[in-house]
Image (cartoon, rainbow, N blue to C red):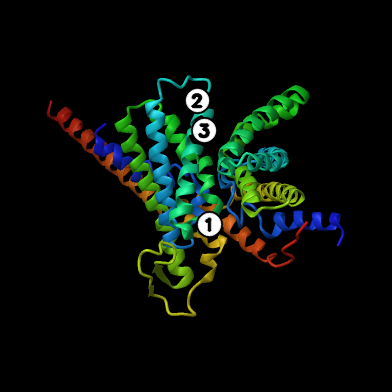
Amino acid sequence: MSTFVAFILAIASSMLIDNVVLSRFYGICPFLGVSKKVKSSLGMGLAVVFVITIATLICWPLYRLLELAHIEFMDTVAYILVIASLVQLVGLFIKKFSPSLYKSLGIYLPLITTNCAVLGVVQSNTDQGLSFLNSLANGLGTSIGFLLVIVIFSCIRVRLESANVPKAFKGLPIALIIAAIMAIAFMGLQGLFTGIKL
Amino acid sequence: MTTKKNFLKGIIEENPLLVSILGTCPALATTKTIEAAIGMGLLFTIVLICSSVLVSLLRKLISEEIRTPAYILIIATFVTIVKMLTNAFIPDLYSTLGVFISLIVVNCIVLGRAEAYASKHGVFDSLIDALGMGLGYTLAIVGIAFFRELLGTGGLSIGKIFTFIPEAKLQIIPKGYEISVFQNPAGAFIVFAIILAVITFIKNRKEEYKKAQDKLKKAQAKAALSKEGEAK
């Protein structure tokens, strides 16, 4: 299998089979909080794709530097600093080059710092000792999986607003039930292909 | 606010998970077994207490502009300490919780309490607040874990993660009748949804009761007034 095909398969694997929200439970807060409108969920998802991809690109070499200095235990502290400053930097960049995109992403950018998907992906890359290409595939796949699921979820929630739901289940509880049904649907993809090494 | 009230508000009125809906990721991910949930709650409470006390101690030194990065750094430091201690002393807990110990850094509750409470109150008050919030969160996730383990495996077991206590298992639902979906991610969502729905139901009932009481009082007052008018 060529490296390219393996790379694509690794992305698909972490996007569909081990979906970030529905089976690994990263980033539930924005998943529930920013999914009332399709447009805003799309904005949030795109911002997350952007930040996770760049964060994995930076944090892999950073860990090698920490290893050189024999302070591997500082990884979490280093990562959170990188992510927080990265989010700020990305915000500034987008503001300069594309004010319209900044306007639509505006409020969601600072929220990404506390999105556990970003730190979760970077940290689990380190904990599993993945190679650079594998880390990148994991980052890309996870973030695209997040985008996919949050957009599907928001589409369902928009329709749910006009549905006749029991009073106690209105709002968050019914949304969680929908998430459960989506999780069951994604469970069907398990075992499609696993253990791709790059 | 009295100390007792300050402590209790984190458990019932302002429960971080069930009322404010914060910190949902570990609440769903680490609740497969009761033991894992207890471990998670314990580590979370330790980090919350330490960071709240330190933030409260430094509240006059940290300037307004760099508040958030400073808090995140304090929290990340304590998480690293807790992570290393867990790895050294309870390695089974460390491998069960995995990356979710590191993810306490981005748990909104810790940062939220630092911002909303510890940065404005004294050390003792912050300590009590953190203790209440931590205990409230622990109780909430242990509750979720109780239903997931009971329905998913048919019984409750201890001693698998905390290896220093003897292993024991209590089988309640006979083997073959357990509903294994509750051990899967989907089950976590369902249990959490039903718990939230029950809480909303109780809240609605209370509000309706209050409204009915108010209406009754108003009607009584009106009746009393009209009687007075008649008497005059």
Q: Chain of mark 3?
A: B
- Residue A24, compared with residue B151, is above or below; it is above
Residue shown at 48% from the left, 78% from the top: B177
How far, Cα to Cα, is label 3 from label 1? 31 Å
Residue A120 is marked as none
- Residue B157, compared with residue A42, is above or below; it is below
Give the structural element (helix, strand or loop) at label 2: helix
Q: Residues within 10 Å of mark 2 (few under 14, many from 20)?
A: some
In the picture, which quadrant includes the N terminus of chain B?
top left
The location of residue A60, given as percent across then percent down, is: 70, 43
In the picture, which quadrant includes the C terminus of chain B?
top left
Q: Residues within 10 Å of mark 1 (few under 14, many from 20)?
A: many
Q: Which residue is mark 1?
A: B189
Type of the residue with mark 1: Phe
Is label 1 in contact with label 2 (beta carbons under 8 Å)? no
Q: Earlier in the sequence, mark 1 or mark 2?
A: 2
Q: How many marks?
A: 3
Type of the residue with mark 2: Arg
Viewer-nearest of labels 3 and 1? Answer: 3
